[in-house]
């Protein structure tokens, strides 16, 4: 019973990885466009026709890949957003300075 529950949980995420995506957002306080990173899930494949022990091993490996991609891509997103925040703050300060003069 527990194996079936685990399999039912892993099946939807089996063919998924996480990837960082950069988007452009508008900061209305500074009147500038700024970049922002988000973590998105992408599906690689679908494992609907596997059976037996080989299927379980495949799902475990796919789950490990999904978890590893979440950790690596999550780190990239956090680091990227920190860099983009500093970039936005610098551009915001520059736009406020040029508006004041």
Image: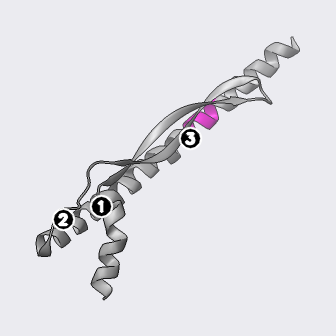
User: Residue at coordinates 13% horizontally, 75% vertically from top-left?
Assistant: 52
First reached walking from the N terminus: tag 3 or tag 1:
1
Q: Which residues are magenta?
A: 81-87
Taking depth in this image into account, of 63 and 82 the one nearest to the observer is 63
- Residue where numbered disc 1 is placed: 14
Taking depth in this image into account, of 94 and 29 the one nearest to the observer is 29
- Residue where numbered disc 2 is placed: 58
User: Residue at coordinates 73% horizontally, 26% vertically from top-left?
Assistant: 92
User: Residue at coordinates 26% horizontally, 51% vertically from top-left?
Assistant: 45
User: Residue at coordinates 34% horizontally, 80% vertically from top-left?
Assistant: 5
Vertical arrangement, residue 65 with respect to residue 41, above or below: below
**Nearest to viewer (mark 3 / mark 2):** 2
* 2 is within the stretch colored magenta: no
The residues bearing labels 3 and 2 have C-alpha atoms spaced at a distance of: 34 Å
**Nearest to viewer (mark 3 / mark 1):** 1
**SS for dot 2:** helix
């Amino acid at each position: 019973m527990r194996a079936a529950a685990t399999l039912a949980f892993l099946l939807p995420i089996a063919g998924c990885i996480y990837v960082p995506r950069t988007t452009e957002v508008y900061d209305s306080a500074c009147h500038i466009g700024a970049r922002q990173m988000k973590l998105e899930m992408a599906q690689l494949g679908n494992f609907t026709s596997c059976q037996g022990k080989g299927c379980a091993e495949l799902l475990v490996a796919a789950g490990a890949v999904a978890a590893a991609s979440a950790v690596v891509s999550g780190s990239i997103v956090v680091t990227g957003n920190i860099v983009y925040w500093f970039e936005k703050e610098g551009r915001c300060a520059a736009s406020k300075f040029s508006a004041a003069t």
